[in-house]
Amino acid sequence: MKKLLLTLMALAALTIAQGQVQPMVLGENHAMLKLEQGRKMLLLPVQEKEEIAAIAVLDGRNEMVKRLNVKLAVDKVDYLVPVELNGAKLLDITFHGDRRTKGAVKDFACWREMKYSETFDTSNRERFRPLYHHTPLYGWMNDPNGMFYKDGVWHLYYQYNPYGSMWENMTWGHSTSRDLIHWEAQPLAIESDWLGSIFSGSCVVNGNDVVAFYTSAGQHQTQSMAVSKDGGKTFTKYEGNPIVTSDKPDFRDPKVFWHEGTKRWIMPLAVGQEMQFYSSKDMKAWKYESSFGQEYGNHGGVWECPDLFELKNEKTGMSNWVLLCNINPGGPFGGSATQYFVGQFDGHKFTCESMPKVTKWMDYGKDHYATVSFCNAPDNRRVVLAWMSNWQYANQVPTMQFRSANSIPRDLGLFKYGEETYVSVTPSREMDAVRGKKLKQPTEACEIVVDMKSQTEIVLSNAKGEQVVMTYDGKKQTFSMDRTKSGDISFSSDFPCVTVAPTYGNLKQLRIFIDRCSIEAFDADGKMAMTNLVFPSEPYRNIKVKGGKATIYEIKY
């Protein structure tokens, strides 16, 4: 009996050994891993504090088919990420960092927990994951890209790192929705190649085709194109890439649109601290037209993610062109933010109607960046989404399975105040469709409508003493949000803050959208918007309003 038991134990040990990943250690920072054939994916253990390991994925001819940068675990596994193998034969792994303090490569924790799998569990493990905002199933997300509407479906692409929850390995993730609220994850849309990682860009609907324009971020930043014949599911890269080049170090984020007046395609590009405009008849050959930005607006950081479109003032019937200019750093309260300019565009040149020193912000919170609009939105609407974070602390917020969400969808318009024309921002009508029954107290996912007087204070709080204080001052015409005691603020000294917005006249009604880790406040008429993240240890269940009346609605998600 004892002999049989020993034999069974030996067989079990052999089975375990055979199931383990067995690397070939070639040096103090170099290893290779022969991959078992027929396997769907390999799960890589990640440790966020570690240095990046460079992984070359090789095929049977030892040609590289993919290159990844992953923080492979050395002594502790924070989470796993999947790599689709698709017949790959070998991983060539180079570790970085001082191995004298890390130990021997053969003893790293990644080898003990690295494993093959047919599936990857994406069920939510994060208490701060929003309930009705778009988030990636796992991994890192920043700028929204390539958004368009076609055949009843809203398509959202985004800057995505599928191999960790910090910025790296930029590719285009993809999600779709029929109502701008409920999103379905789709396979990766555009992945890196020899020209570089896939940075931000745009899509246009051209007949039955969807054409994507994006920045190839390699040794230099160049502009590339890809075409989808299946409604945006898969893309074939143009053989003539790159289509636009420059000797400037910051040269990115093409936002292409059709200009009816000149019968040409127009491509605004962010170039350092200005926007450049290019035109084309065929989307392949592009001609430089003009630049805008010198001495205009805020220049506290690099200009990024442009958008250019025409809007109509419904009260006056007059139209203006609006140039969105996302900037990092340089925001009104530090870090990244969205500024804009109002003027005219004739297909060649943008002319701003304001004086150069005037700066206009689309949102006065800390967590609203990379705002761009959907192409081809129905009813001539101008619908935008933003990245709901800030580069000052986006890599440190207290989540790991995923990082970052998008704002709720917003519709843009125009309004006049004094001598200036401003962009109005209101929650898209799709948010009205998910408004549910009235509630007696706030929940972790709700809308609060506040009818205000000339002086109003709104305090959201929980049993832990955490709170967010919002104050409207009709005399000063300002609205503020204080999140200095909102919950976990320990991850960054830049996070606790008070943000203040001008109201451009009196506010009568405020709409506040709460979703686990975010608060978005809007003037009901669109004259003010403010977006801030919060990380309370438990939901804000209490509300006190001085100088106003609050009505709370559930949000059906």
Image (cartoon, rainbow, N blue to C red):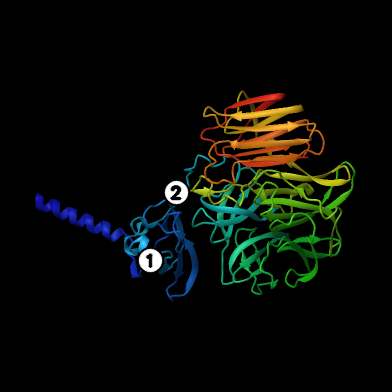
Tell me which numbered mark, 2 or 1, is placed earlier along the sequence: 1
Q: What residue do we see at 88% from left, 41% from top?
A: 315
| Distance between the alpha carbons at the discs numbered 2 and 1 | 21 Å
| 173 sits left or right of 428 in the view | left
Looking at the image, which is closer to me, 254 or 60? 254
Q: How crowded is mark 2: few (under 14 residues within 10 Å), some or many (20 or more)?
A: few
Q: Position of residue 296 (x, y in %)?
A: 80, 57
Q: Position of residue 197 (x, y in %)?
A: 58, 65
Q: What residue do we see at 72% from left, 28% from top?
A: 456
| 333 sits left or right of 380 in the view | left
Q: Provide the secondary structure element on which disc 2 rests.
A: loop
- Residues marked 2 and 1 touching at CB (< 8 Å): no
Looking at the image, which is closer to me, 496 or 19? 496
Q: Position of residue 489 (x, y in %)?
A: 55, 41
- The quadrant in which residue 234 appears is bottom right
Q: Provide the secondary structure element on which disc 1 rests.
A: loop
Mark linked to residue 121? 2
Looking at the image, which is closer to me, 85 or 336? 336
Q: Position of residue 543 (x, y in %)?
A: 62, 26
Q: How crowded is mark 1: few (under 14 residues within 10 Å), some or many (20 or more)?
A: many
Q: What residue do we see at 57% from left, 28% from top?
A: 541
Q: Return the residue found at the far bottom.
A: 61
What is the three-letter code of the residue carrying label 1? Answer: Leu
- The quadrant in which residue 512 appears is top right
What is the three-letter code of the residue carrying label 2? Answer: Asp
The answer to whether residue 319 is above or below residue 529 is below
Q: Return the residue found at the far front.
A: 493
Residue pointed to by mark 1: 35
